[in-house]
Image (tube, coloured by chain):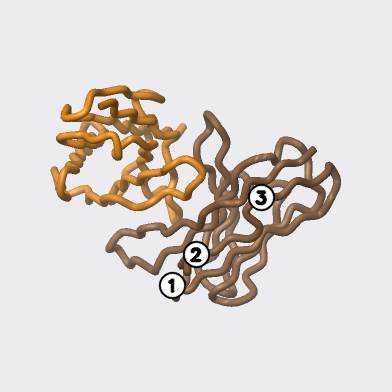
Chain colours: A brown, B orange
């Protein structure tokens, strides 16, 4: 089984719909992240969470919200999807690092298409 | 403004040659820099981490250098193989999160 699992793998939705992408992990890591990847723009950070009670905005958080339901679960919501949110979304985890360098472990991604 | 730049979007080399990928950054002072590999349709996979006080790091056929004066990291794959074909991303710590470059897609032909 994958250590970082994202569901669904693919999703097609219409403009204005609410959609939730889910991420669960079995690595026991405290830190979880949501990135989106667009051709030519690379990976960009949407939100991150260092523990269950901690939520932080990344560089492109507008139009998104997140919920950290448990240490192992971190979901990303699009309250009202728009076409420019069409992208490949990745969830990632890391342990605390504490100066040792945080290595990220990524899920397989969710390809979202907003029509 | 802060930037991470990887020298080219695509690099094509022949099998057996050494591939060299470049990552430059401006307006950052990272304590460490990382390299990841990404295959099509998959999430990035961690390869190597190098700290600011390390000049060079090796792992099998991979070598990474880190020059904090030039604000540059070089990523080398020696004796490259077609299986090394992938997109390679550099990443560095910016505040409390990891920021990625856009990646360089390496194609190794046999």
Chain under callout 2? A
Q: Is residue A42 left or right of residue A56?
A: left
* Residue bearing the label numbered 1: A27
Secondary structure under tag 3 reads strand
Count the marks: how many?
3
On the rendered structure, is B94 left or right of A61?
A: left
In the displayed image of the protein, which residue is found farthest to the front?
B110
Chain for disc number 1: A
- Residue pictured at 43% horizontal, 72% vertical: A27
Rendered residue at 26%/51% (across/down): B49
Q: Tell me which label, 3 or 2, sits earlier in the chain.
A: 2
Camera-nearest label, 3 or 1: 3
User: Which quadrant of the figure contains the C terminus of chain A?
Assistant: top right
Rendered residue at 36%/38% (across/down) = B88
Q: Are marks 2 and 1 in contact (CB under 8 Å)?
A: yes
Q: B1 and B51: which one is in front?
A: B51
Q: Position of residue B79 (x, y in %)?
A: 15, 34
Reply above or below: B90 against B20: below
Q: Position of residue B84 (x, y in %)?
A: 29, 38
Distance of label 2 from label 1 (alpha carbons): 8 Å
Q: Which mark is residue A10?
A: 3
Dots 3 and 2 on the same chain: yes
Mark before the other along the chain sequence, 3 or 1:
3
| Residue drawn at x 35%, y 59% as measured from the top left | A102
List the residue tagged with mark 2.
A4
SS under mark 2: strand
Neighbor class of circle 3 (other Cα within 10 Å; few <14, some 14-19, many 20+) is: some
At label 1, counting other C-alpha atoms closer than 10 Å, the crowd grade (few under 14, some 14-19, many 20 or more) is some
Which element type, helix, strand or loop, lies under badge 1?
loop
Q: Chain of mark 3?
A: A
Left/right placement of residue B26 relative to residue B20 reads: right
């Amino acid at each position: 089984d994958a250590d970082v699992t994202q569901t669904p793998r693919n999703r097609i939705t219409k403009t204005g719909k609410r959609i939730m992408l889910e991420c669960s992990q079995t690595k026991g890591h405290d830190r979880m992240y949501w990135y989106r990847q667009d051709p030519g723009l690379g990976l960009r950070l949407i939100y991150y969470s260092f523990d269950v009670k901690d939520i932080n905005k990344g560089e492109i958080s507008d139009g998104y919200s997140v919920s950290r339901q448990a240490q192992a679960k971190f979901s990303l919501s699009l309250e009202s999807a728009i076409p420019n949110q069409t992208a490949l979304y990745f969830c990632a985890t890391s342990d605390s690092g504490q100066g040792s360098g945080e290595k990220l472990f990524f899920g397989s991604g969710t390809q979202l298409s907003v029509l | 403004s802060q930037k991470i730049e990887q020298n080219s979007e695509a690099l094509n080399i022949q099998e057996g040659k050494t591939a060299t990928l470049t990552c430059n950054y401006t307006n950052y002072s990272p304590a460490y820099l990382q390299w990841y590999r990404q295959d099509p349709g998959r999430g990035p996979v961690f390869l190597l981490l190098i700290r600011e006080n390390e000049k060079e790091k090796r792992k099998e056929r991979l070598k990474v250098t880190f020059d904090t004066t030039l604000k540059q990291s070089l990523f080398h794959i020696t004796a490259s193989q077609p299986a090394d074909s992938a997109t390679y991303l550099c990443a560095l710590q910016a505040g409390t999160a990891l920021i990625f470059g856009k990646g360089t897609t390496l194609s190794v032909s046999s």
